């Protein structure tokens, strides 16, 4: 067990050292979500945020049906706070090691009864890290930037050798100056159906 923990720590140190060598897949002109003849429909949110076809929660954004079959549609939630997040990310390349480079295609958030469906390319960004152990999906709507952190870390950061490593999904909101508005809300990943 000590060897395994040492190996994990070594990989983490190596990975953190490479974070600067990884980067951001911000959408640009080529990453725009639009009807451009590639067979992928626009991912416009439902009119006035109303659920589509009887869908409830964040499914009301309709993202799951709007992208390529190879795109990843990920769901996260906190049943106590009734917060739901759905992101759609597209693999656009490979980084060092087993790192996947993603482009964020859509970000849906249901919080405090308000549904936010964000799919405009310039409002989305995805920061990837080595082995994708510290990734960030970000979406901006009006004067608020929502940030979902997808990270693999020790359960107890003060005991990185003996603590089990777990995936965590904290959600936060910031104003455009970077001031924290709320969060972190610790979400759980919902397994696919």
Image (spheres, rainbow, N blue to C red):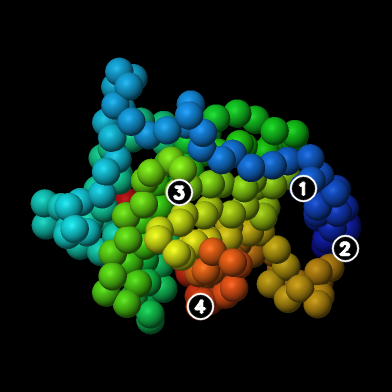
Q: Quadrant of residue 34?
A: top left
Give SS at disc 2: helix
Would you name the residue on which mark 1 appears?
Answer: 19
Asked whether the beta carbons under mark 1 and mark 2 sit within 8 Å of each other, the answer is: no
Compared across the picture, whether 189 is left or right of 64 comes to: right
Residue 182: % across, % down: 50, 78
Q: Residue at x 40, y 58 (%)?
A: 141
Gap in angstroms between the C-alphas marked 1 and 2: 25 Å
Give SS at disc 3: helix
Q: Earlier in the sequence, mark 4 or mark 2?
A: 2
Q: Residues within 10 Å of mark 1 (few under 14, many from 20)?
A: some
Give SS at disc 4: strand
Would you name the residue on which mark 3 appears?
Answer: 123
Asked whether the beta carbons under mark 1 and mark 4 sit within 8 Å of each other, the answer is: no
Marks 1, 2: nearer the viewer: 1
Judge whether 97 appears above or below 51 on screen. above
Would you name the residue on which mark 2 appears?
Answer: 2
Asked whether the beta carbons under mark 3 and mark 1 sit within 8 Å of each other, the answer is: no
Q: Residues within 10 Å of mark 3 (few under 14, many from 20)?
A: some
Compared across the picture, whether 157 is left or right of 46 comes to: right
Would you name the residue on which mark 4 appears?
Answer: 182
Gap in angstroms between the C-alphas marked 2 and 3: 44 Å
Q: Residue at x 46, y 56 (%)?
A: 140
Gap in angstroms between the C-alphas marked 4 and 2: 38 Å
Compared across the picture, whether 164 is left or right of 35 comes to: right
Gap in angstroms between the C-alphas marked 1 and 4: 26 Å
Q: Residue at x 81, y 75 (%)?
A: 159
Q: Earlier in the sequence, mark 3 or mark 4?
A: 3
Asked whether the beta carbons under mark 4 and mark 2 sit within 8 Å of each other, the answer is: no
């Amino acid at each position: 067990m000590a060897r395994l923990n040492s190996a994990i720590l070594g990989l983490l140190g190596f990975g953190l050292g490479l974070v600067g060598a990884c980067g951001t897949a911000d959408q640009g002109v080529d990453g725009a979500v639009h009807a451009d003849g590639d067979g992928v429909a626009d991912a416009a949110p439902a009119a006035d945020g109303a659920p589509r076809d009887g869908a409830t929660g964040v499914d009301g954004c309709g993202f799951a049906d709007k992208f390529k079959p190879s795109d990843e549609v990920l769901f996260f939630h906190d049943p106590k706070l009734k917060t739901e997040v759905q992101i759609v990310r597209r693999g656009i390349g490979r980084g060092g090691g087993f790192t996947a480079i993603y482009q964020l295609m859509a970000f849906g958030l249901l919080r405090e009864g308000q549904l936010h469906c964000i799919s405009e390319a310039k409002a989305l960004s995805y920061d990837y890290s080595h082995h994708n152990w510290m990734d960030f999906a970000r979406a901006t709507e009006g004067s608020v930037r929502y940030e979902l952190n997808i990270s693999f870390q020790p359960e107890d950061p003060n005991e990185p050798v003996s603590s089990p490593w777990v995936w965590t999904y904290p959600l936060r909101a910031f104003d455009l100056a970077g001031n924290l508005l709320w969060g972190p809300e610790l979400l759980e990943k919902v397994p696919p159906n």
